[in-house]
Image (cartoon, grey):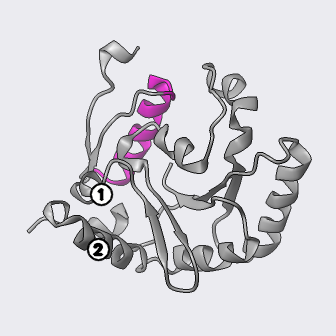
Amino acid sequence: MWNVVTDRPPAEGIRDYDLFYFDDSDLGWDAENEVIRAGARLFGDLPVPVEIRNEARVHLWYEDHFGVPCEPYPSTEAAIDSFAATTCCLGVRLDGADRWRVYAPHGLADVFNLVVRPNPVLAPRQVYEAKTRRWREQWPQLTVLPWPDSAG
Amino acid sequence: MLIGRLAVGEQLDALRATLSRNEQLLEVLVRATTLELPGWYLTAG
């Protein structure tokens, strides 16, 4: 998005694509890994990797990885709600050949206006600050709003 | 007018037009449908 809005080549600097899904019928790693392997076969010829994650399993590893506990998500939408920046709470999929489904609980204005707004509901401050540091290097036009002191 | 000040429906059209400029992303979206994953989204997290 921000590449196009800032007149850069659309895929410039994109390190990966995140493909999230929700399947709580089997919370074992093997089931998720099977999907990841299928994705590797499907997307393997693309120039950047597609990272696949089952959001139903996030609570099993989140605290070890980020240092704060995460309640089990009831859906992919709930997982998107907890992204570190509200601006990034955005998911898109195709339902059918040409039917786009867009989940954007905080709207799209900040996305187009290049405003990054913190979402202090789960991810710790350092996650937001690390991400926004990297984004600002890539898109200097971004306005990055500070993490609220009250959120720790 | 700034896209962020357009009506929501027009912003959605702009989103689709913007994302469609990225052929890689479009390819991922199209191929992802074949995995038939429950509740899937390509995200910006």
Kind of residue at badge 2: Ala
Residue depicted at 38% across the width and 49% down the height: A105
Q: Report if residue A126 lies within the magenta region.
A: yes
Residue depicted at 53% across the width and 73% down the height: B25
The chain ID associated with circle 2 is: B
Looking at the rendered structure, the secondary structure element under dot 2 is: helix
Q: Report if residue A11 lies within the magenta region.
A: no
Dot 1 crowding, Cα within 10 Å, few <14, some 14–19, many 20+: many
Q: Which label is found at residue A108?
A: 1
Kind of residue at badge 1: Leu
Q: Which residues are magenta?
A: A122-140
Residue A17 position within the rendered picture, expressed as x and y whole percent measured from the top left: 59, 61
Q: Is residue A41 visible?
A: yes
Residue depicted at 28% across the width and 50% down the height: A140
- Does residue A56 appear left or right of residue A119 in this picture? right
Residue A87 position within the rendered picture, expressed as x and y whole percent measured from the top left: 35, 47
Residue that extends furthest to the bottom in the rendered view of this protein: A97
The chain ID associated with circle 1 is: A
